[in-house]
Image: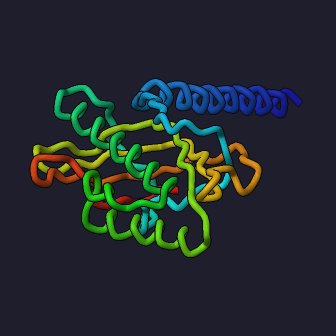
Amino acid sequence: MQSGRRFWVIGLALLGVVVAIIVGAFVLGDSFRPKVDTVPVSTGAAASDKATPVAAPALATTKPSNLQTANSPLEREIEAAYLRYWEVRAEAFLNRDTSHLSEVMAEAELARTRQQIDDLKAQGRAARIVVEHRIAFLEVGEAKARLYDEYLNRSYLVDPQSKQAVQTPGPGGIAKVSYELKKIDGAWRVIDGMRHD
């Protein structure tokens, strides 16, 4: 009898230790996770749920590690160029006008975005891009950079003339994408993207 009770006490003590280790791991995991800022992009649109295609051809299964927020002048310059990319992109999707895309994007990203807008035209639709960014940097160099954006996407389809939603806007969803940027002719441009969903 005494031996059985002792096993129960030892078992409960071990269970308590395991629970304490798991709770400690969660607390430490949160304290070492990199902080990223939320930067809303002004699109002048209400929230929605019909997401437009994200420029992200490949799918990665893991979230990038070693993230950091913009601290240096170079990182802030790249971040500003990235946010400008989104402003131009939003305008292009709303007006189905690709004439300014090459100011903020190039290579695969430019070709993909032009195709997406052509697809919208063929459907007789336009899109209002509404996103809230959480940006962090993966790599930063003088001519190339990679950043990670875990953004809330509330983009939706609209009528191209009235700009009214063609469906009831909803809550949207989180998109996790890393973007490659390259300095071309003295200006940063997004050249490609990869999803991490």
Looking at the image, residue 86 lies above or below residue 125: above
Relative to 180, is 127 on the left or the right? right
Percent of width and height locating residue 109: 33, 63
User: Could you tell me which residue is drawn at 17 percent across and 28 percent down?
Assistant: 73
User: Could you tell me which residue is drawn at 40 percent across and 64 percent down?
Assistant: 113
Looking at the image, residue 197 lies above or below residue 83: below
User: Could you tell me which residue is drawn at 52 percent across and 42 percent down?
Assistant: 131
Q: Residue furthest right?
A: 1
* Figure quadrant of the N terminus: top right
Q: Residue furthest bottom?
A: 122
Percent of width and height locating residue 92: 43, 55
Count every numbered label the image shows and give the total: 0
Relative to 144, is 15 on the left or the right? right
Q: Nearer the viewer, residue 183 or 35?
A: 183
Q: Nearer the viewer, residue 97 or 135?
A: 97
- Color style of the picture: rainbow
Q: Nearer the viewer, residue 11 or 24?
A: 24
Percent of width and height locating residue 36: 42, 30
Relative to 49, is 75 on the left or the right? left
Looking at the image, residue 80 lies above or below residue 53: above
Q: Quadrant of residue 100?
A: bottom left
Q: Quadrant of residue 39?
A: top left
Relative to 43, is 11 on the left or the right? right
User: Could you tell me which residue is drawn at 57 percent across and 56 percent down?
Assistant: 127
Q: Nearer the viewer, residue 27 or 178?
A: 178
